Amino acid sequence: MATFRRAFAMGAMGVMGFLYRNRLIRYTILGVVLLVLLVIAGGGWYFSGILEADGLRIDNEPPEFKLTIIAIGDGTITLRQLDDADVEDNLSISAKWGVTNGETYGQLGDVLSESEALVTREFVPQVGEFLVGQPVYLERTAYPHNPRSAYGLDYREVVIPGPIGNLGAWYVPPVSRSTEVWAVLVHGRTGDRDSSIKLLDDLSDLGVHSLTIDYRNDEGAPPSKSGYYDFGVTEWEDVEAATSYAFENGASKIILIGDSMGGGIVVNYQLQSDLADRTVGLILDAPMLNFGRTVDKGAEERSVPPPITFAAKLFSTLRFGVDWGAMDFLSHANELNVPILLFHGDADTTVPIETSLEFAEKLPELVELHTFEDTEHVQAWNLFTDEYEGLVRDFIERIR
């Protein structure tokens, strides 16, 4: 009997130990799961704040000075990276760039020589006097800041009545043969009208009238109701105001041209506007067709784990009202019915090239896609100027 009691007691202790160990395992697993969820939630909250600051918040601040002038020669300039500034990656890339201190303006060409700290490049001064020791920064625009100083084109500053206030624009008439085709040019996030200067000379020469527009949240333009960039969800209405202005002034056909966020804006115009049936073509450069995918790309570049990115996007909806579905124009690509010329660099770290590849795959009969090797975000024109402009001219000749 005593033996039985001892065996029973030992068995009971074994069962209790087993249950205790199981409970401990369950509590440990539960604790780990809760910790992981807390990390994801905390990381998501933190990165939603980063998304608000770096993506949604209006940014019309002037660029940062990153370089200083070391020497100016006959058709050359030598530049050095400023020690306390972010690195200017484009300083050592042979391509057409603008260099400016905000008042002066010049154009850079090929890299001629490079040491550890200094880069000497081809240089054409265009506006103002460059001096040794001046701080400067680079621009993709590569031309001074209006159609006349860039190309000698006549132009007018015009005011377009928009849905939430007046919008400024450049109107450039054709230099020779005139058609009833107008182009509306739409810049990307944090950009301005200068971003579109590169195509104005070709458009004018082809007989195309052009409107290079401001839209909501640009400097001097009315703010959006959200207080943030809406990535095409509302900005398309300003493009509609511009096309209405064009029709009232003699246009019968419209070409829409947009880069980066501007590309997404014109695509959403084409999806939403009652005037879209008068569009004869789109020209898009690295268009932001799905803001959520762009955020995913940015998170990947920062090595943010996908679960935290997912949480950040969820918190962005709760905190800042971001409607990710409304910013996904790629899903509606099959609703488009106009020819599209599409450019995208395969080294784009801002807008994933995969979105343009999918866009072209959805519309094989409409999209003419050109990808550019080792090319960053909206830099195809800078690196491959002649090819880019030739493709634009050929496309316009076909569709107008």
Image: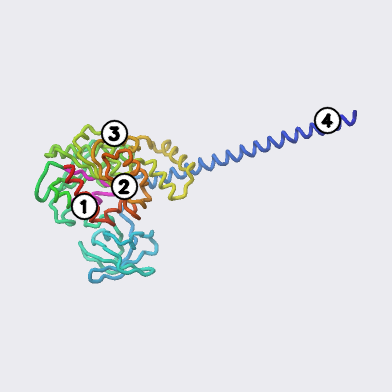
Q: Examine the structure image and report whether residue 394 is included in the region drawn in magenta.
A: no
Q: Please, what is the three-letter code of the amino acid marked with disc 2?
A: Ala
Query: Considering depth in this image, is 288 or 159 the residue closer to the camera?
Result: 288
Q: Is residue 207 left or right of residue 145?
A: left
Q: Secondary structure at mark 1?
A: helix
Looking at the image, which residue is at 33% across and 61% down? 93
Coordinates of residue 77 in the picture (x, y in percent): 27, 68
Asked if residue 133 can be seen in this view, the reply is no
Structural distance between the alpha carbons of marks 2 and 3: 20 Å
Coordinates of residue 309 in the picture (x, y in percent): 46, 43
Asked if residue 84 can be seen in this view, the reply is yes
Q: Are marks 1 and 3 in contact (CB under 8 Å)?
A: no
First reached walking from the N terminus: tag 1 or tag 4 = 4
Coordinates of residue 96 in the picture (x, y in percent): 26, 59
Of the numbered discs in the image, which one, if any, rests on residue 8? 4
Looking at the image, which residue is at 34% across and 61% down? 66
Query: What is the number of callouts on the image?
Result: 4
Disc 2 target residue = 286
In which quadrant is the N terminus drawn? Answer: top right
First reached walking from the N terminus: tag 2 or tag 4 = 4
Disc 3 target residue = 335
Q: Please, what is the three-letter code of the amino acid marked with disc 4?
A: Phe
